[in-house]
Amino acid sequence: MAEITDSGSGAGAGGGAAPSACPRCGREDQVLGVSAAYLRSKAKMRVERGGGEDDSVTIREENSALAKALAVAPEEPDNGTAGCVGVLLLLASIGAFVWGAIEGKWFGDDTAPRLYGTDGDGHFAVDQPATYLGWIGAALLLVGVVLLALSGRAVRTWRRRTQPGRVAADRVWADAWYCGRCGTVHFAGERSLTLQEFRTRVWTAGGYGDLAVRHPAI
């Protein structure tokens, strides 16, 4: 059974206690502070599975399109898949080397290639299977390390870009109002802004306005 519950509040304040009338429609009955509109558009999904002693409850939060459009900063890169694949490759490479060591493939004295006869035309050398196993293990190790490095680098880059100016961006973000009727954002005494214009203004205040072009609001 799944149940959706609204995690938002009522009429939040954005730059003041009383809602600021929307410059486009001139009304304020559907005007919320951006912070309240953002929280209201975030849903919590409560999933119940099992029954009796095996009953378990899973709660997952999902962002709607509006919540993503009103975000004060770009979402943190989700590199969980790359990281997991990197760990699995590292474990596979370690397993290959351990197996080779246990079987005596790496440190044995007999390292000469095996010779196979042909149809009377002489012999040709074939490498031991352990040779190929070593190359495969080395390749898995290299790819795993690269994936882990790239995963960590993306998160560090995101933090360097967004964290220094986050307070300034939050300040501008909290002063804005969202009109649910028009789907626009405005500041008191100013014209209505599209969600993209609002994003650009907030992210520019935080020092990462160039990312608004790469991450459009809609």
Image (cartoon, helix red, strand yellow):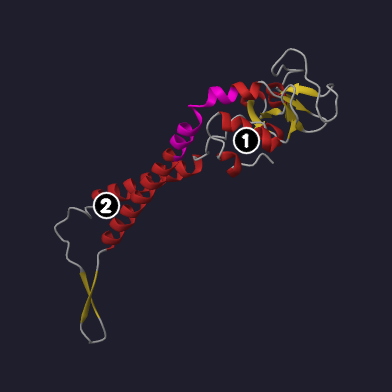
152 left or right, relative to 76: left
Mark positioned earlier in the residue sequence (2 or 1): 2
Which residue appears at 67% of the width and 32% of the height?
198
* Inter-mark Cα distance, 2 to 1: 56 Å
Residue 108: image quadrant is bottom left
Local SS, label 1 = helix
Percent x, y for residue 86? 42, 45
> Quick one: which residue is furthest to the bottom in this view?
120
Percent x, y for residue 52? 66, 24
* Magenta-highlighted residues: 154-170
Identify the amino acid type marked 2. Answer: Gly
| Foreground of the two, 52 or 111 | 111
Percent x, y for residue 183? 78, 33
Q: Residue tagged by mark 1?
A: 200
- Magenta stretch: residue 16 in it? no
> Secondary structure of the magenta portion, mostly?
helix
Which residue appears at 62% of the width and 26% of the height?
54
Percent x, y for residue 49? 66, 30
Identify the amino acid type marked 1. Answer: Thr
Q: Quadrant of the C terminus?
A: top right
Local SS, label 2 = helix
Q: Quadrant of the N terminus?
A: top right
Q: Which mark is residue 123?
A: none
| Foreground of the two, 34 or 99 | 34
- Magenta stretch: residue 163 in it? yes
Which residue appears at 73% of the width and 21% of the height?
188
Which residue appears at 45% of the width and 32% of the height?
160
214 left or right, relative to 37: left
Q: Which mark is residue 100?
A: 2
